[in-house]
Image (tube, helix red, strand yellow):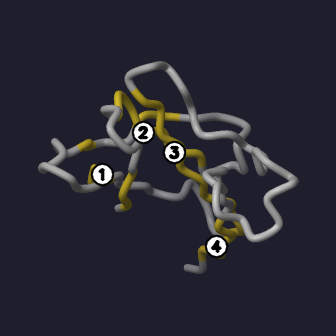
Amino acid sequence: AGAAWSGEEDIEKVEISTDGGETWSPVDTLHPREAYSWYRWEHNWNPPAEGKYTIMSRATNSDGITQPMEFPNPWDGRGYGNNMVFPYDVEVRG
């Protein structure tokens, strides 16, 4: 589960990757946004085997703009405008 934000634009889709961004799949459920709030989403993932995985999610808005994979503004030293995709490493054990 997670949340996506796109300011005044609508979120058209949220995708998830469990292989570090090599492949992307749509999330199972993208809930409608309430006024002035984030979009909530859900995804059920069944790992194929024990091991280490890198999970990432990204959103695309109604203008077709998808979150960047890298920090969009290297001159922004404090990261105020950072909307990049962040990886989360997990380890699945039996």
Eye-nearest disc, 4 or 1: 1
Pointer 2 and pointer 3: residues touching (CB < 8 Å)?
yes
Q: Residues within 10 Å of mark 1 (few under 14, many from 20)?
A: some
Eye-nearest disc, 2 or 4: 2
User: What amino acid is at disc 4?
Assistant: Val
CA separation in Å, label 3 and label 1: 11 Å
Q: Residue 16 carries which label?
A: 3
The residue tagged 2 is 14
CA separation in Å, label 4 and label 3: 14 Å
Quarter in which the C terminus is drawn: bottom right
Earlier residue among tags 2 and 1: 2
**Image height check: is 39 above or below 79?**
above
- Indicate left or right for 46 with 68 as reference: left
Q: Residue 90 carries which label?
A: 4
Eye-nearest disc, 4 or 3: 3
Q: Position of residue 43 (x, y in %)?
A: 35, 52
User: What amino acid is at disc 2?
Assistant: Val
**Image height check: is 4 above or below 91?**
above
Element on which disc 2 rests: strand
Pointer 2 and pointer 1: residues touching (CB < 8 Å)?
yes
